[in-house]
Image: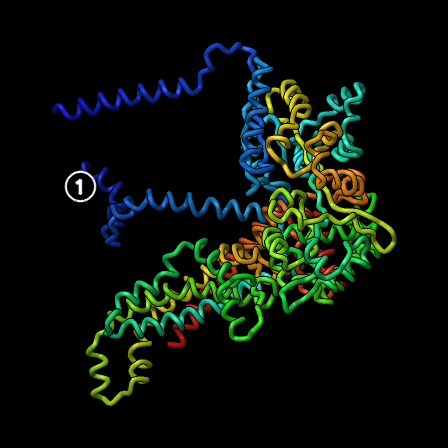
Amino acid sequence: MPLKVMQPYAASAPKADWFVRTRVQPLPYLLLLPSLALIFLIELYPFINGVSFSVHKGSLLGTGPFVGLDNYLRLFNSADFYNSLWFSFVFAFCNVAISYLIGLALALFLNLDFPGRGICRVALLVPWIVPAVVSIVSWKWLIADRGGLVNIFLNSVGIGPIYFLSDSGWAMVAVIVIKIWRSFPFMMLSLLAALQVIDRTLYEAGKIDGANGRQLFWYITLPHLKNISIIQAILMTIWSINDFETPYLLTQGGPSNATENLILLSYRFTFGRNDVGRGSAVAILTLVVLMILSTIIMRQQRKAV
Amino acid sequence: MKAPKLRFRNIRLLAVLFASSVAAMVSPVTGQSKDHVDLQFWDMIWGGPEYIDAGKALVAQFNQEHPDITASYRSIPWTNWYQTFLTAIGSGTAPDLSTGAGYQAVQLYDQNAILPIDDLISDWKAKGKLDDFLPNTVEILKYDNHYVALPWAIDIRVWYYRKDLLQQANVQPPTNWAEFKAAAQALTKPASDQYGMVAAGDTLGEHLLLTLMFNNDGGLFTADRKLDLASDRNMEALKYLGDLVQAKTVYPASAGYSGEDALSAFTQGKGALFLTTPGLRARFPKLADQIGILNPLVGPHGDQGTIYWVNNIMLYKQGKHPAESKIFLEWWSEHEKDLWTKGHVTQLPTRKSFASDSYFQDNPETKFILQNYVPIAKTTATHATGIFPKLNDVEGEGALQTLSQSLLQGKDVDGSVKTAADRLRSIMED
């Protein structure tokens, strides 16, 4: 005869069964809940707000009327948007590629055993440690046309002064070079950390098998740097596309909008023109661009290495 | 067991202290009557530290003379000024009244944040008090058939020149465009890193373009506020600047210069002619003898003109005491001379009675500008008569700055103007 007292237990049994069946422990998820709630509040609310602004004709004082995709369509018909998109790509590509190569070269160098290695490591981290405003303003002084050390040197070797921030082409070069200078220590540090965990016996085995230095680098070092390189490339792409301070402090996007990236364009629309709708649309499109770029980088690098 | 009790006592003590502090902060000041009014006056920083001191002293004097009103003075820095006001309005904490940028009042009026002062103006008109203001300075601030603010100062751009450099090159101060171009060529000595003219690619670059356009009877707008950048007179003015750049008479770094960079180049003798704000002689006393002001240039068709802004004081709708705010506004407007005599503002007063004071008349620089530049000055709205809200976006968006950077780099004038006109049109259509 079945026991009636078993009924209440039977009613709650499927839930308990599910945890037992799937071996899922509920406690860790419960502990995560407060953090997840905070992240949703900090990340999701501004994002939803941004999307909402981008489909309204708003000002800094209010959201304004709903305009659908009009802000996006107007951007797609605007030369300023394509100019900013182009500069953002050039800026990000040059920064990621060149800072990676410099960082890799320096990481390989610092992975060698030589006297003064510690001092070199610290010295090479300086561009990363110094606050952005300090380093960018210092660079601005260095490349100034009057009294800047770079131009004093160029004058001394007979090359006339170069007006780095007054010519569209040179301004692009200056902004990119200074960004690379600020970025390479991150690349160097991460790659150095990855290099130091490669098992030395792999190199010894390779040497015994007759591999030369190039082959050791190509078949042992590079594959071990694959994962960290993917992460670095994605992070640096995001940081480059999102970089506000470098072009703003150096050129404010000028001259003639030559160094205006998507973030500066968003800033100009929002605060210069009081057009929060279009400023938000630029920000949302920047996010889309970043997601596409990150996906492409991940796929390409996984295929390549 | 004692420790938890002690902690609990401490918490209670802290709670009592906190509550009493909050109560002390929110309670009215002892001795003030129920009808006592507190006003918030936000003043932009229009000068050095002495300006803020002069402003505070004036407010203290007002408070002394009006025992039932206490005005609080708050200095507002120019950095992110627009966001500061919009945030305050958006959060319902706008001041009772404030000074602000030239077109701030009309733009905020359009967003239902400004209280018109029509009654005050009508009253002053009846009493003849408006006669004390320089011509057109009050009417410029009329928008949508309402007076949205009261003028207090004029910000203007004037042409300065280096007397020493002109003497060395045996060049007379130019009086018209043809002479200006010839002088710039004669003063240009690239080997000595000296050029005829220095300019900037920031807002000062925009002011240079507007000044040249006004100097040729051009302007950004038609009388009915339609965009008119590519008009014949404007194109002639912009091509004139383009010609100066092509002739390599403009300091080559100008496109990337800020106003301060350009000023520094001017004081170092890198450029002999420079359009900027008044007050250079006071700022550089050691160079004062070497700095002269040009007569307003005469354009190729006999026109004169420069850019100016009529800075103003405005009342906010969120203010709880409009009547007392108007009392303060009236008092401030009639007593603010100390802002110049003690605060050393470089702008010029809009009141004739202040302008005729020995402080201005004994200073040859300000006297000259008041006599020669102010009467020919025009606002960004030109040829429209009054200012309007879009002017703030037009200036803030930077389309004309970009145009000045392109022209100062020697880029094609027609193409650069077309790009700028498209951008401006897009602002106007919003």
Q: Is residue B35 visible?
A: yes
> Residue A129, relative to residue B246: is it above or below?
above
Q: Residue furthest bottom?
A: A210
Check the picture and name the quadrant holding the N terminus of chain A. top left
> Residue A214, relative to residue B257: is it above or below?
below
Q: Is residue A72 visible?
A: no
Residue in the image at 63% along x and 36% along y: B345
Residue in the image at 57% along x and 45% along y: A53
Q: From the top left corner, tell me how far across and down residue B143 is, in percent.
A: 75, 34
Nearer to me, B354 or B241: B354
Secondary structure under tag 1 reads: loop
Residue in the image at 70% along x and 50% along y: B160
Q: Quadrant of residue A4?
A: top left
Give the chain letter at badge 1. A
Nearer to me, B204 or B107: B204
Q: From the top left corner, tell me how far across and down residue A73 is, in percent.
A: 65, 56
Check the picture and name the quadrant holding the C terminus of chain A. bottom left
Q: From the top left corner, tell me how far across and down residue B350 is, in percent.
A: 73, 32
Applied colour scheme: rainbow
Circle 1: residue type: Pro
Left or right side of B331 for B127: right
Residue in the image at 53% along x and 58% along y: A250
Query: Which residue corresponds to mark 1?
Result: A2
Binning the other alpha carbons within 10 Å of mark 1 as few (below 14), some (14 to 19) or many (20 upward) gives few
Left or right side of B406 for B94: left
